């Protein structure tokens, strides 16, 4: 990544301008042209560094709950269990991790029935030994900013 | 309730990824049958009310050079949780920090997501976190495979 690419990426992670031509403002702040900013962002999207530019919604404020769930899966079944969980649109993140509780996913749901339905499905899958929910009691940081 | 329905209608449009064009909010305005100024005002209003946290570029950490990532779970005395949470949150390599429900056989209550560029960087950052506050135990749950990272869309 070039110095300019890093500057643009760091800028848009923290202060995306809410104006009709935001990329022109970003260009002025990072010392280049609007065309160049757009070209760089297209390139960074193309090679996968930049996922998207979008609004980040505070789900509980619009009636949704979010939850971290940790599952213990027998290792040979890990991929198939993960793929089954991925089918749910309400599952936003799903990672395998070191340790006995080796599959961790996050869920956004509107009703308890959605959650219990998903849990029942997961518990019925071969290789799943345990599922536990880890609700957040306090949020200290939701940063999503990485110094690149 | 009418405001809530209206909020959801706006969110259902402005939650979409921004197009990489000179005037990216035009698409949103067309979908909401309004003009760009009104869309920008609606987004700012939703931000002021805390419904939209931010509008920002979302970087894929592994592609940006952060290949060593972990969820780290600490067991902290209840009275010390806020101190631990604030200290951990001040670290630039910690992107998320929460207090979560502990269990008798899983006593961790402070959770962070952290990101490092290589094995040495990872070890140093873990060590730095452990210096910050008193804790009883810790579990470093290193990420092995990303099965999904997506963006939830309301309808």
Image: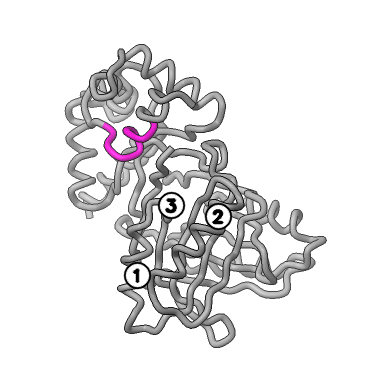
User: What's the residue at 24%, 52% (across, down)?
Assistant: B50
- Distance from disc 2 to disc 3, alpha carbons, whole Å, reads 10 Å
- Residue indicated by mark 2: B122
Is A129 a magenta residue?
A: no
Q: Could you tell me residue A86's position as x and y percent? A: 63, 51
User: What's the residue at 66%, 58% (across, down)?
Assistant: A96
Residues packed near mark 1 inside 10 Å, few (<14), some (14 to 19) or many (20 plus) = some
Q: Could you tell me residue A41's position as x and y percent? A: 43, 23
User: What's the residue at 48%, 69% (across, down)?
Assistant: A112
> Which mark is drawn over residue B93?
3
The one of A8 and B19 positioned closer to us in this rendering? A8
> Residue B127, relative to residue A144: is it above or below?
below
> Residue B18, relative to residue B61: is it above or below?
above
The one of B102 and B77 positioned closer to us in this rendering? B77
Q: Mark 3 falls within which chain?
A: B
Q: Mark 2 falls within which chain?
A: B
Say which of marks 2 and 1 sits in front.
Answer: 2
- Residue indicated by mark 1: A138
> Residue B52, relative to residue B83: is it above or below?
above
Magenta segment, prevailing SS (helix, strand or loop): helix
């Amino acid at each position: 990544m070039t110095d300019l690419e890093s500057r643009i990426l760091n800028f848009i992670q923290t202060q995306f301008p809410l104006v009709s031509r935001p990329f022109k403002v970003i260009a002025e702040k990072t010392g280049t042209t609007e065309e160049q900013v757009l070209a760089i962002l297209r390139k960074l999207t193309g090679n996968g560094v930049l996922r998207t530019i979008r609004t980040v919604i505070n789900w509980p404020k619009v009636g949704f709950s979010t939850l971290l769930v940790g599952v213990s899966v027998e290792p040979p079944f890990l991929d198939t269990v993960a793929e089954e969980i991925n089918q749910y649109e309400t599952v936003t993140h799903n990672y395998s991790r070191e340790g006995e509780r080796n599959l961790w996913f996050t869920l956004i749901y509107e009703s308890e029935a959605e959650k219990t339905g998903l849990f029942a499905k997961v518990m019925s899958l071969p290789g799943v030994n345990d599922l536990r929910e880890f609700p957040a009691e306090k949020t200290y940081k939701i940063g999503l900013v990485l110094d690149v | 309730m009418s405001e809530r329905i209206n909020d959801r209608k706006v969110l259902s449009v402005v939650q979409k990824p921004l197009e990489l064009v000179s005037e990216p909010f035009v698409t949103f305005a067309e979908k909401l049958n309004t003009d760009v100024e009104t869309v920008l005002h609606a987004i700012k209003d939703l931000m002021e009310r805390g419904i939209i946290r931010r509008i920002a570029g979302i970087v894929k950490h592994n592609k940006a050079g952060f290949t060593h990532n972990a969820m780290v779970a600490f067991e902290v005395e209840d009275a010390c949780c806020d101190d631990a949470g604030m200290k951990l949150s001040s670290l630039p390599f910690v992107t998320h920090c929460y207090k979560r429900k502990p269990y008798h056989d899983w006593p961790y209550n402070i959770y962070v997501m952290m990101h490092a560029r290589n094995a040495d960087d990872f070890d140093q950052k873990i060590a730095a976190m452990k210096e910050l506050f008193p804790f009883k135990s810790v579990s470093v749950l290193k990420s092995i495979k990303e099965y999904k990272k997506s963006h939830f869309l309301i309808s």
